[in-house]
Image (cartoon, rainbow, N blue to C red):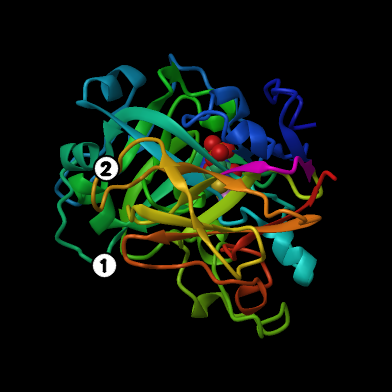
Amino acid sequence: DPYVDDPVRHPALKVNSQRPFNAEPPPEVLTESYITPNPIFFTRNHLPVPNLDPETYRLHVVGPPGGQSLCLSLDDLYKFPKHEITVTLQCAGNRRSEMTQFKEVRGLEWNTGAISTARWAGARLCDVLAKAGHQLCETEAHVCFEGLDSDPTGTAYGASIPLARAMDPEAEVLLAYEMNGQPLPRDHGFPVRVVVPGVVGARHVKWLGKVSVEPEESYSHWQRRDYKGFSPSVDWDTVDFDSAPSIQELPVQSAITEPKDGETVQSGEVTIKGYAWSGGGRAVVRVDVSLDGGLTWHVAELDGEEQRPRKAWAWRLWQLQAAVPAGKKELNIVCKAVDDSYNVQPDTVAPIWNLRGVLSNAWHRVHVRVAP
Ligand code: MTE
Ligand code: MO
């Protein structure tokens, strides 16, 4: 069993798959704190968790022709300026279970918890690439990452991002060795992972072993044959993965974490809580909440860190205290977020359904009963 060496996990996590380990925190726990505590941060593993020795760990950075390849120990990485930022990480499959309810998809049944937020610290990727002699001359190039986790054939997890993002100091791409002030937990990439603010979780390669600059995107399965969006008309017989771009920045997203679907709430006043986030550093400017399925709306109060323009890497938590209209026996609570490009969420899943169940960001809907 290649998984015998996997770490022990927090019992509060809702497990979607044990081997490889995939789990999410319950919604009401997720929005208890702005920063997600490490033990309940959602975990998305495709393979067994490698057990790496920090003493002998080396990160290989391939240099350009005429530059120098680097073989960095953890101590070498610590010598680069330490950069710390709050970043929300979301899996492309977050909220997939709602797509499944509409029509079958292939993938793990994530609810609203395949998203979490941490303070990440490490070296900036642009500093490390510059040290190896890389420059932003090849504007079409890609930075490819390889993990030290691998399948029985020896194939490692891999992904890539455009070189332009990697070399942009304002994009703040990190080779992170700390998560919320602690060394990375094993499940989250110990000792070093990539953190790509504003970009889908799949590119945040954990247990990072190798970085190289290539003329093409990573040839990894997870770059080329997964994590892409398609029309609802495309099925597994007709899908052409080469025809769609790899998911990088994610669309605007929000979800209700309290109350939960099927719950009974007290009459009088109801408190509704949730999270909202958008990709690419776009700030959430507003969250609208409805108690009647979208006929009338309230504006929720946004909590959490103020967001820097174009660098809004982290979510906002939000809440709304609303009067329950007298005589109502049930509420159809809905939320939708707006980002600073005025992107909005689609109202239903049907027009965005896709065979792999990614990019599921329709209005989140929760049905509750009102106590008599
Ligand atoms: N990196 C490696 N090496 N192996 C993986 O399986 N999964 C990716 C990404 N990086 C993965 C990886 C995916 S799809 C996601 S959503 C994030 O890691 C999840 O990060 P987390 O487990 O720290 O939440
Ligand atoms: Mo993911």
| SS for callout 2 | loop
Q: Name the residue under label 1.
A: 140
| Comes first in the chain, label 2 or label 1 | 1
Q: At label 2, which amino acid type do we have?
A: Glu
Label 2 CB less than 8 angstroms from ligand 1:
no
Q: Nearer the viewer, residue 262 or 19?
A: 262
Q: Which of 339 and 244 is in front in this view?
A: 339
Q: Mark 2 points at which residue?
A: 172
> Going by the picture, which residue comes out furthest to the right?
372
Residue at figure coordinates x 52%, y 65% from the top left:
224
Q: Quadrant of residue 230?
A: bottom right
Residue 237 pos. (x, y %): 73, 82
Q: Distance between the residues labelled 2 and 1?
A: 19 Å
Q: At label 1, which amino acid type do we have?
A: Glu
Asked whether, in this view, residue 162 is left or right of residue 1, the answer is left
Residue at figure coordinates x 64%, y 31% from the top left:
29
Q: Main secondary structure of the magenta part?
A: strand
> Going by the picture, which residue comes out furthest to the front?
326
Q: Quadrant of ligand 1?
A: top right
Residue 75 pos. (x, y %): 30, 17
Mark 2: few/some/many CA within 10 Å (<14, 14-19, 20+):
many
**Above or below for 116 versus 309:** above
